[in-house]
Image (cartoon, rainbow, N blue to C red):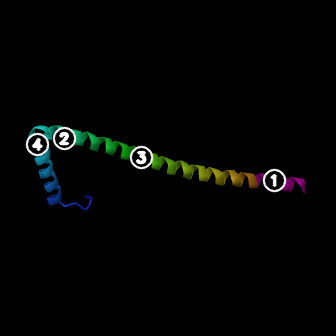
């Protein structure tokens, strides 16, 4: 997943079990789960926000191109009418 093997994760869990103890392990895992859920929600919101920004930027760029084309067309019409 993050370059961590299963054995390394197992070692961390065993050390955490020894440090925290069996009585509080459930609470610690519950809090870790809540943290992970918050992290995933925020990361998802960030990704959605970035995607919306990209889409909006593309839309604005296309709009700018259309506006520039309209201005050029208007200038050409003015030039043709003045001749």
Q: Is residue 60 above or below residue 38?
A: below
Which of the two discs, 1 and 4, labels the residue nearer the N terminus? 4
Question: Is residue 76 inside the magenta stretch?
Answer: yes
Disc 4 element? loop
Disc marking residue 46: 3
Mark closer to the observer (2, 4) = 4
Disc 3 element? helix
C-beta proximity under 8 Å, tags 1 and 2: no
C-beta proximity under 8 Å, tags 1 and 3: no
C-beta proximity under 8 Å, tags 1 and 4: no
Which of the two discs, 1 and 3, labels the residue nearer the N terminus? 3
Pointer 1: what residue? 77
Q: In percent of the image, x 9 and y 41: which residue is there?
A: 22
Q: Residues within 10 Å of mark 2 (few under 14, many from 20)?
A: some
Q: Which residues are magenta?
A: 73-83
Rendering coords of residue 78 (x, y %) = 84, 52
Rendering coords of residue 50 (x, y %) = 46, 49
State which quarter of the image contains the C terminus: bottom right
Q: Is residue 7 above or below residue 74?
A: below
SS majority, magenta: helix
Pointer 4: what residue? 21
Q: Is residue 21 left or right of residue 49?
A: left
Q: In percent of the image, x 48 and y 47: which residue is there?
A: 52
Which picture quadrant has residue 24? top left
Pointer 2: what residue? 28
Disc 2 element? helix
């Amino acid at each position: 997943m993050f370059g961590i093997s299963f054995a390394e994760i197992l070692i961390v869990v065993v050390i955490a079990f020894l440090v925290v103890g069996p009585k509080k392990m459930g609470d610690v895992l519950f809090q870790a789960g809540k943290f992970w859920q918050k992290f995933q929600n925020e990361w998802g919101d960030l990704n959605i926000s970035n995607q919306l920004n990209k889409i909006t930027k593309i839309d604005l760029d296309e709009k700018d191109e259309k506006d520039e084309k309209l201005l050029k067309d208007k200038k050409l019409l003015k030039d043709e009418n003045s001749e």
